[in-house]
Amino acid sequence: MIKAISEFFLEKAGAGCAVLLCSMLPIIELRGAIPLGAGLGLPLWQNYLLAVLGNMLPVPFILLFIRKIIYWMQRSKIRFFNRFAAWLDKKAVKKSAKIEKCSFWGLCLFVAIPLPLTGAWTGSLAAATVGMRFKTAIVSVLLGVLIAGVIMSLGSYGLVAAFRFFAG
């Protein structure tokens, strides 16, 4: 199965499509897509642009619809959804003062840190949960994604160059 997936991306869809799709996935996001593109030999500028674009595509939908999804989950007859929505609201209320205090720059730095669970998905979820304005949130997340992309590109292409130097 892994062979079929890798053949699809490398032979049919191409490395650029693999980077774009990978960067759209939660948790992996741009932090996994840029090293993937570097490993597949994409030029830095192309890899960076595709990863940023893919990472930002879900953001407006998260910002616009997550509150409605949480509201639906709270009223669902499925117990798991009720608990998850309650947990999410509890966390949001607990962190809302910090997020509101630092709002734009706090969210930007949170998204810019290239660690798992600190990317555009989580940042957008936090912004929507505390009621941050759409325009403010999207610009803040975009700036954070751009910074994370630079950090990951420098690290990824530096490692690829070092590996090639020592291997060959």
Image: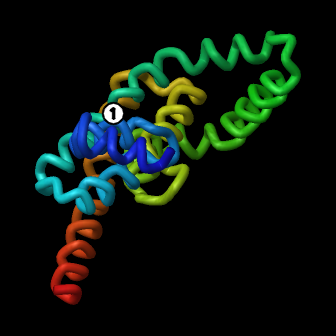
In-front residue for pair 7/15:
7
Secondary structure category for the residue under label 1: helix
Task: Please indicate, yes or no, whether residue 97 appears anywhere in the rendered image.
Answer: yes
Crowding at mark 1 (Cα within 10 Å: few <14, some 14-19, many 20+) = many
Residue 30's spot in the image, x, y percent?
36, 48
Residue 8 lies left or right of residue 87; in this view the side is: left
Task: Please indicate, yes or no, whether residue 106 appears anywhere in the rendered image.
Answer: no
Residue 10's spot in the image, x, y percent?
26, 45
Residue 134 lies left or right of residue 159; in this view the side is: right
Residue type at the position of mark 1: Met
Q: Is residue 45 above or below residue 62?
A: below
Which image quarter is the C terminus in?
A: bottom left
- How many numbered marks have been drawn onto this rendered protein structure? 1
Residue 112's spot in the image, x, y percent?
37, 53
Q: Is residue 135 above or below residue 34?
A: above
Residue at left offset 79%, top offset 28%: 86
Q: Is residue 80 above or below residue 97?
A: above
Q: Residue furthest bottom?
A: 166
Label 1 sits on residue: 56
Residue 5's spot in the image, x, y percent?
41, 42
